[in-house]
Image (cartoon, grey):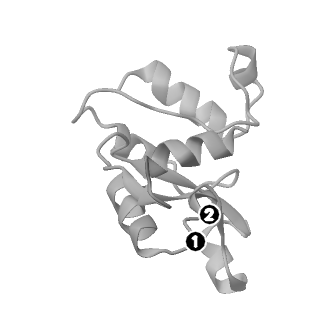
Amino acid sequence: VNREQFHLLTLYFTNDKRFEEKGYSLRKGIMLYGNVGTGKTELLKAFQFNRRKCFEVITAINITGKVKQEEDHTFWKYYTHYVPGASGQERYYLQNQIGWMIDDFGTEEPVNVFGNKVDPIMAIILHRYE
């Protein structure tokens, strides 16, 4: 991980307008990708609990397993997480809605949804940006 990536993430998670001056949007999520074993997960975990936008970590394979067990196949719930009650909110700086960090993107298997093979992670991303 280089210093520029760390600096950009710091700007993003502190809601610093300099992030937008570099051509990015503070209103959107982020996608960090790269080779296996380069420290992406550990870098993002350093920002997991912050005053702007906390998030939980879940693996793509874990999401796929949960989708296989559900009958309604509502993927949308995996891009926003509502924090129940004040005691849970303290951990997230009183935020009542937090995001997800989907780890190991690309390792998931398609699932059968109403007779069609669907990539649940791709469905989440497409649903998020519609």
> Which residue is rendered at x = 40% and y = 41% of the image?
43
Q: Position of residue 11 (x, y in %)?
A: 64, 31
Q: CA distance from mark 2 to mark 1?
A: 11 Å
Q: Amino acid at mark 2?
A: Lys
| Residue name at image x 38 percent, y 56 percent | 111
Kindly indicate the quadrant of the structure image that contains residue 10. Answer: top right
Q: Is residue 46 visible?
A: no
Nearest the viewer among 126 and 49 is 126
Total numbered badges shown on the rendered structure? 2
Residue at mark 1? 72
Label 1 crowd (10 A; few <14 / some 14-19 / many >=20): few
Left or right: residue 108 compared with residue 63: left
Precedes in sequence: disc 2 or disc 1: 1
Q: Amino acid at mark 1?
A: Asp
- Left/right placement of residue 62 relative to residue 57 reads left
Give the residue furthest to the front: 115
Q: From the viewer's perspective, is residue 103 above or below residue 73?
A: above
Give the side of residue 78 with respect to residue 119, left or right.
right
Residue 97 makes an appearance in the image: yes
* Residue that numbered label 2 is attached to: 77
Is 53 positioned to the left or the right of 9 in the image? Answer: right
Residue 104 place in picture, x, y as percent: 33, 45
Residue at image point 68% right, 55% down: 51
Quarter occupied by the N terminus: top left
Mark seen at residue 123? none
Residue 109 vs 13, above or below: the answer is: below
List the single residue furthest toward the left. Answer: 37
Pick the front one: 76 or 93:
76
Q: Position of residue 84 (x, y in %)?
A: 68, 81
When the figure is inspected, residue 19 is found, relative to residue 87, above or below; the finding is above
Task: Place residue 85 in its image quadrant.
Answer: bottom right
